[in-house]
Image (cartoon, helix red, strand yellow):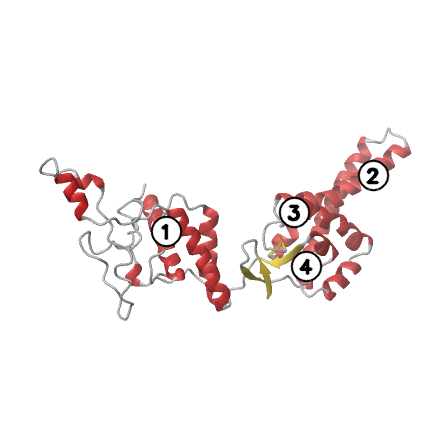
């Protein structure tokens, strides 16, 4: 494992790629690059047959630089660190903070790769990877990047754990439309790998993710609810809504609703006393309150009798 620190000062554990897998990925990339280089060279030889020897030499040098040096740089930039060989071996190039690489990272890696891989037949890259604690070659050191294993072997990953029964349907009134897809992906990845993280690291990540989700939904995390359980319940609510939109109300059933508008959700056995009043019952839609007023002051009295839920009704 390699402990990396993200821009939010949260420690992550990534798996640096070993030298054999990196060597195989580089070999596959070289085979693809050389194949393209040969095909392009044959085409240029036929197209530049009428030029003099100096022009043909200049074209050959330009072709070598553009295909064998510029090709990997372009591919890693467009794919954010996934080349053909790395994709086949389940590897990816990331920044030191765990984020996706940009053009400048790919440029430094590609230019130094010409020296330590092509010109020295990979000897310099192998020695640097063996000496480095995280298996980085010189291009990775100067670019501030790291090659990691993107695939988790079977049995090491896990499914998203379901929330406890007493939280099912408790967040059905949340407005989840403002939560971006990147945040949902981060929540899902954390829930599937939280058992593999250090308890202190996992706890800090859960608090940060729960705070981000609560800030997007406009409702705070209920007191007495652990952040990991809160994230699992909110993610289940989102999945239930997506299933209902996809299959309709008669397809996949949504998460069970609370016990009713007039009573709180019953607490679990042994739960702290602060849990039941943490989230007030979801108020009925505004349309159900229209027929109830009996006079000019009836509407104000009916709304005053119901406590505010603190949640934004779903769009």
Residue 178 appears anywhere in the view: yes
Crowding at label 1, few (<14), some or many (≥20) Cα neighbours within 10 Å?
A: some
Residue 172, numbered label: none
For numbered disc 1, what is the local secondary structure? helix
Q: Where is residue 82? Give x, y as percent.
A: 62, 50
For numbered disc 2, what is the local secondary structure? helix
Q: Nearer the viewer, residue 33 or 302?
A: 302
Q: Nearer the viewer, residue 132 or 307?
A: 307
Q: In whole angstroms, how far apart are the C-alphas of marks 4 and 3? A: 15 Å
Image height of 295 relative to 248, above or below: above
Residue 76, numbered label: 3
Give the residue number, with chain letter if any, for mark 2.
60
Toward the top, the furthest residue is: 50
Image height of 291 relative to 309, above or below: above
Toward the right, the furthest residue is: 53
Give the residue number, with chain letter if any, for mark 1.
239
Q: Nearer the viewer, residue 305 or 246?
A: 305
Q: In whole angstroms, how far apart are the C-alphas of marks 4 and 2? A: 29 Å
* Mark 1 or mark 4, whichever is nearer to me: 1
Residue drawn at the location 68% of the way across and 47% of the way down: 106
Q: In whole angstroms, how far apart are the C-alphas of marks 3 and 2? A: 24 Å
Asked if the residue at tag 4 contacts the one at tag 1, i.e. Cβ–Cβ closer than 8 Å, the answer is no
Give the residue number, with chain letter if any, for mark 4.
22
Residue drawn at the location 22% of the way across and 57% of the way down: 264
Q: In whole angstroms, how far apart are the C-alphas of marks 3 and 1? A: 33 Å
State the quadrant of the C terminus: top left
Q: Earlier along the polypeptide chain: callout 2 or callout 1? A: 2
């Amino acid at each position: 494992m390699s402990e990396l620190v993200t821009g939010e000062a949260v420690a992550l554990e990534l798996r640096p790629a070993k030298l054999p897998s990196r060597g195989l990925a580089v070999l596959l990339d070289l085979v693809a690059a050389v194949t393209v280089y040969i095909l392009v060279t044959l085409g240029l030889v036929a197209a530049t047959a009428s030029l003099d020897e100096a022009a043909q030499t200049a074209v050959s040098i330009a072709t070598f630089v553009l295909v064998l040096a510029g090709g990997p740089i372009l591919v890693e930039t467009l794919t954010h660190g996934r080349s053909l060989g790395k994709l086949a071996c389940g590897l990816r190039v990331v920044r030191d903070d765990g984020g996706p690489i940009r053009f400048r990272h790919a440029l430094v890696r590609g230019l130094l790769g010409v020296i330590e891989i092509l010109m020295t037949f990979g000897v310099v890259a192998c020695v640097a990877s063996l000496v480095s604690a995280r298996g980085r070659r010189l291009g990775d050191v100067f670019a501030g990047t790291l090659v990691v294993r993107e695939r988790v072997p079977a049995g090491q990953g896990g499914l998203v754990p379901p929330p406890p029964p007493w939280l099912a349907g408790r967040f059905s009134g949340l407005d989840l439309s403002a939560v971006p897809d990147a945040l949902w992906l981060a929540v899902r990845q954390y829930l599937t790998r939280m058992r593999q993280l250090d308890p202190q690291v996992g706890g800090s990540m859960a608090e940060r993710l729960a705070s981000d989700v609560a800030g997007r939904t406009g409702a705070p995390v209920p007191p007495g609810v652990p952040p990991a359980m809160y994230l699992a319940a909110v993610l289940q609510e989102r999945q239930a809504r997506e299933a209902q939109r996809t299959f309709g109300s008669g397809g996949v059933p949504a998460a069970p609703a609370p016990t009713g508008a007039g009573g709180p959700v019953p607490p679990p056995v042994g739960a702290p006393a602060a849990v039941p009043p943490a989230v007030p019952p979801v108020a009925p839609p505004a349309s159900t309150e229209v027929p109830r007023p009996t006079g000019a002051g009836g509407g104000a009295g009916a709304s005053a009798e119901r406590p505010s839920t603190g949640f934004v009704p779903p769009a």
